[in-house]
Amino acid sequence: MKLQQTIAAEIELSGQGLQTGAMAKMRILPQPVDTGIYFRRSDLPGKPSVKAEINSVVNTQKCVTIGKEGWQISTIEHLMAVFHGLGIDNALVEVDAEELPRGDCSGRYFSQKILEAGITIQDQPRRYTLIREPIWVEGTVFKQNEPLKSALIVLPSEELQVSFTFTSDHKATGTQFYHYCLSHDTFVSEIAPARTIAFMNEINYLRSQGLALSDAYDSVVVVDEDGYRNELRFPEEIVRHKILDLLGDIYLLGPLVGHIVALRSGHALDIELARKIAERDRV
Ligand SMILES: [Zn+2]
């Protein structure tokens, strides 16, 4: 039986948001058992907070945004993935802006900070969502205006595993596959360091939409017509980062035991699958 965990000490960090480019200060505070993960806007009157759960999601374009009553916090997925990977059940995240600091555009910065602060084992068991029957969702992604099917299926399994296929015709990235089995140590070494990917033509489009405004595009993995513009941390860094995003999104359900098979999925489909799993649990 695994027990719930929180962080051993308060953590403070700051930095620029990935999409807005705005500077943000953030604190992560330990919480008692059965609290869950909460996010709070410390810059708003009354410092409102919202639970990181599936019903709090208000937007999935490019990043995951949660909120309520007209206020929101965006790009929570990398920190949520780190909570998932390190097995943190209870924490309060306070931020003084609309978007979390980006760290190094992966989960490594957050996981290092949490490992430095330490992890406290609490005295109540974790509650897992178990998968007994397959549950799946399908979507469509457009690559150069060509529609391609995306899919996510979760199957019964004795542990959390993810098998992800990322497809691309780009000569540098190619199609990438990775199979990952969740554990504290493998998360820190195999998944947390994988950074956000950006194709140069997408960056230009996102900027025209008021996104991708930070200087982070020095540190994300940028791919242009000639290939990678920076050095990779892993040959298949892109698909590992896709797994990081998925682990963050699915943690809006709390810990889950199942084998997730993903084809070209992104935040919107991740959230759709999580909703479907949550609805099944309510029946
Ligand atoms: Zn990401």
Image (spheres, helix red, strand yellow):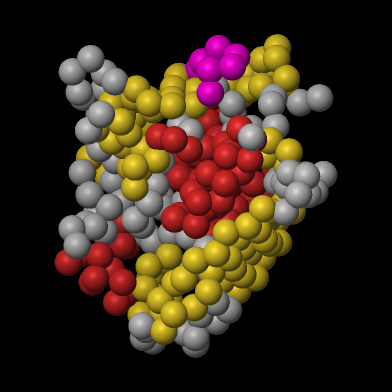
Q: Position of residue 16 (x, y in %)?
A: 27, 44
Position of residue 51 relative to residue 23, above or below, is above
Residue depicted at x 23% and y 71%? 204
Residue depicted at x 31% and y 72%? 202
Q: Which residues are magenta?
A: 30-36
- The part of the image, by quadrant, that contains residue 239 is bottom right
The C terminus sits in image quarter:
top right
Residue depicted at x 49% and y 66%? 139
Asked whether, in this view, residue 154 is left or right of residue 231, the answer is right
- The part of the image, by quadrant, that contains residue 118 is top right
Residue depicted at x 32% and y 34%? 67
Asked whether, in this view, residue 55 is left or right of residue 162, the answer is left
Q: Position of residue 108 (x, y in %)?
A: 51, 46
Magenta segment: does it hold 33?
yes
Q: Position of residue 265 (x, y in %)?
A: 52, 63
Number of numbered discs: 0
Judging depth in this view, the residue of 203 and 55 nearest the camera is: 55
The N terminus sits in image quarter:
top right
Q: Magenta segment, principal secondary structure? A: loop
Magenta segment: does it hold 240?
no
Judging depth in this view, the residue of 230 and 75 nearest the camera is: 75
Most extreme residue toward the front is 283
Is residue 250 visible from the viewing direction of this image?
A: no
Judging depth in this view, the residue of 209 and 219 nearest the camera is: 209
Is residue 88 visible from the viewing direction of this image?
A: yes
Q: Position of residue 53 (x, y in %)?
A: 48, 33
